[in-house]
Each structure stands twice: as structure tokens, then as C-alpha cells.
């Protein structure tokens, strides 16, 4: 059973993957219409796409007043299919109104 705070926290997160860039921009803008802040999260090769999403929202929608807040850079230890462990870089970008 999840608490209300955990459910809310998950609703304002956008996880970046391999879909087209504008898909994530649109999803982030929809979340920003409902939430005061949104976390854009990515890891590995998707980090550049997450940065692009944040920059498109801030630069092209700047007259609305979106801004980048906290940026967290980290790494995770992942076990690959062949059984080896490796570090994968992660990023979290906070965007707010």
C-alpha cells in the first residue's frame, strides 16, 4: 500500500526513454499544468534527451515563466545481462512554473 505522498511524487515524474523528443516535452507540459514542479529523470544515453526536454521548455516557453530548479547528477550500479556490474549515470532535472 502506497501513501498519498508517494503517489503524488510519482505523478510529477517524467522518465525519459527512447520515444521522440517532443513526446516528453508534451508530457512535461501537461504535468506542469497540473503540478507546480515536475522532475525529468533519465539515465545513460537518455541524459542528453532529458537536458534537451528541459531546455526546450525553458527557452521556448520562457514567456510563460518556466524555470529549471535543482539538478541532481548521480550514478547507479546496474547488473548487466552477462552478470557484470557497471555504473550508469543518472540525472534529475526539476522544472517549475
Image (tube, grey):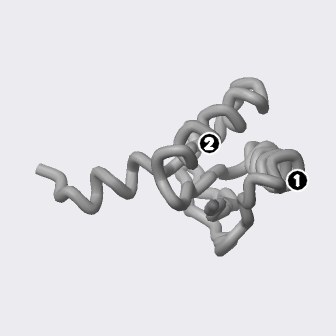
Label 1 element class:
helix
Where residue 24 appears, x then y in whole percent?
67, 35
Residue 95 image-quadrant placement? bottom right
Q: Nearer the viewer, residue 85 or 32?
A: 32
Q: Around disc 1, counting alpha carbons within 10 Å, would you say few (fewer than 14), some (14 to 19), or many (20 or more)? A: few
Q: Is residue 60 above or below residue 20?
A: below
Which residue corresponds to the image point at 54% horizontal and 44% vertical from the top-left? 33
Cα–Cα gap, marks 2 and 1: 14 Å
- Is residue 48 something one can see in this rendering? no
Q: Nearer the viewer, residue 64 or 19?
A: 64
Looking at the image, is mark 2 or mark 1 earlier in the sequence? 2
Q: Residue furthest right?
A: 59
Residue 80 image-quadrant placement? top right
Q: Residue furthest left?
A: 1
Q: Residue furthest front?
A: 63
Residue, disc 1 = 59
Where residue 81 appears, x then y in whole percent?
56, 37
Q: Is residue 70 above or below residue 22?
A: below
Residue, disc 2 = 28
- Is residue 76 something one can see in this rendering? yes
Residue 91 image-quadrant placement? bottom right
Which residue corresponds to the image point at 66% horizontal and 51% vertical from the top-left? 43
Q: Is residue 91 above or below residue 46?
A: below
Q: How many marks?
A: 2
Which residue corresponds to the image point at 57% horizontal and 37% vertical from the top-left? 30
Amino acid at each position: 500500500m502506497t501513501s498519498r505522498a508517494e503517489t503524488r511524487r510519482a505523478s510529477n515524474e517524467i522518465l525519459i526513454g527512447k520515444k521522440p523528443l517532443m513526446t516528453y516535452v508534451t508530457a512535461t507540459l501537461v504535468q506542469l499544468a497540473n503540478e507546480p514542479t515536475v522532475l525529468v529523470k533519465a539515465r545513460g544515453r537518455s541524459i542528453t534527451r532529458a537536458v534537451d526536454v528541459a531546455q526546450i521548455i525553458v527557452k521556448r516557453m520562457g514567456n510563460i515563466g518556466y524555470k529549471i530548479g535543482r539538478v541532481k547528477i548521480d550514478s547507479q550500479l546496474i547488473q548487466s545481462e552477462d552478470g557484470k556490474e557497471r555504473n550508469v549515470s543518472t540525472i534529475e532535472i526539476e522544472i517549475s512554473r
